[in-house]
Image: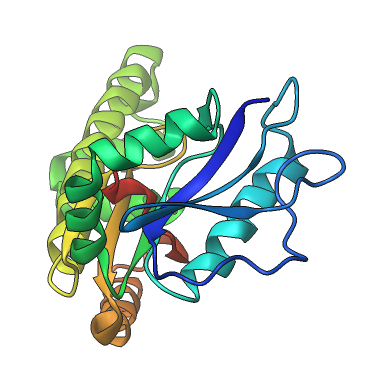
Amino acid sequence: MSTYVYGIARSTHPSPPQQLGGVGDPPQPVRALRQGRLMALVSDAPENLRPKRRDLLAHQQVLRAAGAQGTVLPLRFGGLSPDDETLAAVLAEREDHYLERLRALDGKSEYNVKASHDEQSVLRLVLADDPELRAMAEAGRSGGDGGAYEGKLQLGERIANAVRLREAQDADLLRETLKGPAEAVSAGPQSTGWLTNLSFLVDGEHIAEFVAAVESVREEQPHLVLTVTGPLPPYSFVE
């Protein structure tokens, strides 16, 4: 049977509690596989593993429980080894590397920040910043030349370009403002609906400063809608 891997920690890390269930139905018991100065949090891998909600939550819960007791290098959902012996060999081969990453992440958590625009607020901003664009919009509303089809098309294109420019500016602003209290920044995958998706590695001593910086952005840039998730295991800062 394959071995499912949740994360890697030092061999001195406490063993997972017996009642902690992992992926699978029924949940597979989570155990510690120790090799040299490292240990891996593992369980037997269920057959036909799929990213179902229950298993995704179980993976996260194991890492949160382990992370509350010390630093863990988290694997993303779906990490498999053919067996315990193969995993132990990898831990032995890369022991120095994993120990270096554990030292680098000691006492640190990940905060993910996604940002989008409030459409009406950003529209008011781009019109306020461009008198010519504002005049075109007012002409369109009054039924002047700007109200013709070609005028409306040109207006729509210019507004769309102005909004895209504002998105890029706001993405840079967010990164620059929040990276101060953070140890590192990692850009996440982009998707429809977000103008930026950033993960920040934050030391425990600077969490309050980081949260205050987020609130400062919210207050000073009300056209930005921020979604902040954390503290999380530092997924974005582990190979």
Residue sticking out furthest to the right: 26
The quadrant holding residue 190 is top left
**Is residue 107 shown above or below 157?**
below
The residue lying at 30 percent from left, 27 percent from top is 155
Percent position (x, y) of residue 51? 67, 31
Residue 188 visible in the current orientation: no
Task: Give left or right: position of 173 versus 42.
Answer: left
Q: Which quadrant would the C terminus be assigned to in this image?
A: top left
Q: Which quadrant would the N terminus be assigned to in this image?
A: top right
Residue sticking out furthest to the top: 150
**Is residue 98 shown above or below 182?**
above
Q: How many marks?
A: 0
Front residue of 40/133: it is: 40
Front residue of 2/57: it is: 2
Task: Give left or right: position of 151 versus 83.
Answer: left
The quadrant holding residue 71 is bottom left
Front residue of 16/128: it is: 16
The residue lying at 68 percent from left, 51 percent from top is 57
What colouring style does the render use? rainbow
Residue 110 visible in the current orientation: yes
Task: Give left or right: position of 190 versus 128.
Answer: right
The residue lying at 85 percent from left, 39 percent from top is 25
Percent position (x, y) of residue 149? 40, 14
Task: Give left or right: position of 184 versus 225.
Answer: left
Front residue of 122/185: it is: 185
Percent position (x, y) of residue 112? 39, 57
Percent position (x, y) of residue 24? 78, 38
